[in-house]
Amino acid sequence: MTDNKIPYKIYLEEQEMPKAWYNLRADMINKPAPLLNPETMQPMTAEELGQVFCDELVAQELDETNPYIEIPEEIRDFYKMYRPSPLVRAYCLEEKLQTPAKIYYKFEGNNTSGSHKLNSAIAQAYYAKKQGLKGVTTETGAGQWGTALSMACSYFGLDCKVFMVKVSYEQKPFRREVMRTYGAYVTPSPSMETEVGKKILMEHPGTTGSLGCAISEAVETAGKLDGYRYVLGSVLNQVLLHQTIIGLETKAALDKYNIKPDMIIGCAGGGSNLGGLIAPFAGEKIRGEADYQLIAVEPESCPSLTRGKYAYDYCDTGKVCPLSKMYTLGSGFIPASSHAGGLRYHGMSSVVSQLYADGLMEARTVKQTEVFKAAQEFARVEGILPAPESSHAIKVAIDEAMKCKETGEEKTIVFGLTGTGYFDLYAYQKFNDGVMEDFCPSDEDIAASLAKLPVIE
Ligand SMILES: *Cc1c(COP(=O)(O)O)cnc(C)c1O
């Protein structure tokens, strides 16, 4: 069954691991728009950003000229614990589908936090430590980011305060225990520990929380404590930059066997894994060296690229964070409580947004029940229990492979398998019991939310 020239898993040697991240913005012809200060509506300066993020990360956030940014040795040493991650040829899935397509996936779930988020968490923790900070604060919804950051902080001896959306805190108690094992201090949000939290609890006593509210609590806490900064696990340029390790390794592994992909597929929440996976390929496309079909997959319940508007918007519900020009559904948009928690963000990274606006990338939406069907099909033959978020990419990869079966085309498909689903068994239970539902926001709901976008002169 296996093509004896290409192994089931393509591993790179440790010394073949990339030594620099790739800054796609340096090659982009139309640069993503700058972040705006919510008070002045002017581009955020390095000084203003420095009050929120640590200095090296501010430099990375603003850098649109250097194509390569060296990965410090301390970070590479940590990466070596779980990287290079394998690029797997999905021989068993191909066989099951009886498709002439060749399918590969880059698996990022081989670490305790169970997702790609550790790639940026370790970088952010490293720069915070280097600057002599005491600790960091953050929010977590589904829990993957909080877990990754807890691991990174314990490694560098930093304090880590996580505000976890209350409903997740209660539904995923074991995620919380992993974080506590790594020394993080986890608070269900909204809480009585912040002014924002108290206000929300007074206004909505029974609330189960939201990501927007948890962000506001984490930002407030970082501002009140000396030597603390707020960190974010997606959306920002710096996060996309760190995640390019995924795409660079993928490209190196493909090059090793002279494989040229036709399409590259990734799920998109805030856009960090997708942006990181496609970056080196998008760079070649922009420079006119090669052509690839690049596909973002988002949930039908939160369709920022496919049904949102490309405009400046707030990154959080509390409107305290800078504004970003992105495809957005509006900062007040509350998506239905789907089971892919990591894909429930109202906006999208500005890099991914600009690529999409320039026609360099496509986007598709998929229904939740179809995603779980694809997840089940994948798990049964490839063995890995995928995260619901990652399964969005699986669904489109399978769709594309089935199209090849009709046309007889032998396309090479690569997709990002961002994580494992061991903490999502409540969702799998609903699917297995046949009681999972699909949610599609109405045009009126989206229009009403977009009507509240800020007006920028
Ligand atoms: C957070 C998360 C995502 C989505 O985040 P992006 O920033 O869009 O990559 C996807 N998959 C998993 C497993 C996640 O934890």
Image (cartoon, rainbow, N blue to C red):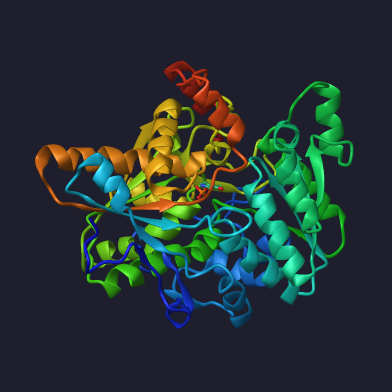
Q: Nearer the viewer, residue 287 or 263?
A: 263
- Residue at 32%, 53% (x, y): give it: 90
- Residue at 39%, 48% (x, y): give it: 382
- Residue 122, located in which quarter of the rendered image? bottom right
Residue 132 drawn above or below residue 426: below
Instruction: Tell me if I can see residue 457 in this picture.
Output: no
Percent across and percent down for residue 287 are 26, 67
Q: Nearer the viewer, residue 196 or 406?
A: 406
Q: Nearer the viewer, residue 412 or 343?
A: 412
Residue 378 drawn above or below residue 441: below
Percent across and percent down for residue 203 are 82, 22
Q: From this viewpoint, which residue is outermost toward the front?
A: 1
Left or right side of 20 for 194: right
Left or right side of 154 for 378: left
Percent across and percent down for residue 247 are 40, 63
Percent across and percent down for residue 366 are 38, 31
Q: Nearer the viewer, residue 265 or 214?
A: 265
Left or right side of 210 for 7: left
Instruction: Tell me if I can see residue 273 in this picture.
Output: yes
Residue 296 drawn above or below residue 291: above
- Residue 306, located in which quarter of the rendered image? top left
Quarter of the image that includes the N terminus: bottom left
| Figure label count | 0
